[in-house]
Amino acid sequence: MNQTILARFKIIDGKESEADEAMKTMAAAVEKSESGALTYIFARNRKDPSEVTVFEIYSDDDTFKAHGASPHMGTFRSYFGPIFDAATVKVERLEQIAGFQR
Amino acid sequence: MNQTILARFKIIDGKESEADEAMKTMAAAVEKSESGALTYIFARNRKDPSEVTVFEIYSDDDTFKAHGASPHMGTFRSYFGPIFDAATVKVERLEQIAGFQR
């Protein structure tokens, strides 16, 4: 069963360009090394650009677990503190009811 | 520029099966009649299944506006009250920073 994740957190004030760089590097690593990651999108709220949303779809639970254990995830986690506010992190596991991508 | 939307709202207690049906019908109508809707996913939170998340990507602002003006959107809006809790609706416009779909 696919695993759909909605993660949300905030960028620390003044760290916006480091944050964008970190998200680009992370997304590129996921795309290159995780074939089971079907969708992986970092976005910032237009009204409050400090708010980051990550929308993620994995083909199954194993590929989701592999994502969490990957070296690039380790690197990305190390940014919670210097670049992203660790206290704001919310991760939700979702169940898809309907819809499509094309 | 593509338009990325995160919408969230709650299902009224006891209306879960009507809600799932409404989401399936809506997603099918969007897929059939809105070629500019690239991604359109309804999901429910696994921990609190009353919480609905809609993740939407439109190819540009015109296709996003056409979505809002579509007859199926009119029908779906009429469910806020009987099926979905209108007071809980939050719609955010997002800017994509990085990522992919495949």
Image (tube, coloured by chain):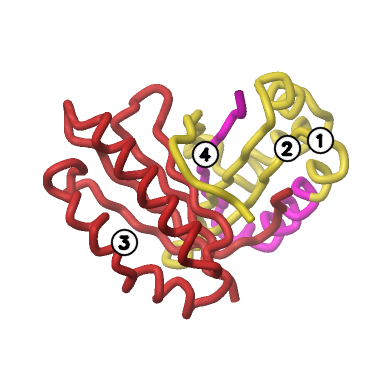
Chain colours: A red, B yellow
The residue pinned by badge 4 equals B6
Badge 3 is on which residue?
A72
Residue beneath disc 2: B37
The chain ID associated with circle 1 is: B
Label 2 secondary element = strand
On screen, residue A4 versus residue A77, left or right, reads: right
Q: Is residue A82 left or right of residue B9?
A: left
x 64%, y 51%: residue: B41
For disc 3, the chain is A
Q: Is residue B8 above or below residue B36?
A: below
The residue positioned farthest toward the bottom in the image shown = A62
**Could you classify mark 1 by the number of other residues whose Cα lies within 10 Å: few (under 14), some (14-19), or many (20 or more)?**
some
Q: Nearer the viewer, mark 3 or mark 1?
A: 3
Q: Is the N terminus of chain A in the top left, top right, bottom left or bottom right quadrant?
A: bottom right
Identify whether A21 is placed above or below B48.
Answer: above
- Specify the label residue B34 is tagged with: 1
* Residue A94 horizontal side relative to residue B81, left or right: left
* Alpha carbon separation for disc pair 2 and 4: 14 Å
Q: Nearer the viewer, residue A52 or A74?
A: A74
Mark positioned earlier in the residue sequence (1 or 4):
4
Under circle 4, the secondary element is strand
Is disc 4 on the same chain as disc 1?
A: yes
Q: CA distance from mark 1 to mark 4?
A: 18 Å
The answer to whether marks 3 and 1 mark residues whose Cβ atoms lie closer than 8 Å is no
Please identify the quarter of the rendering in which residue A50 is found: top left
Subunit of mark 2? B
Magenta-highlighted residues: B1-27
Q: Quadrant of residue A23?
A: top left
Given contact means CB atoms under 8 Å apart, are the residues at marks 3 and 4 in contact?
no
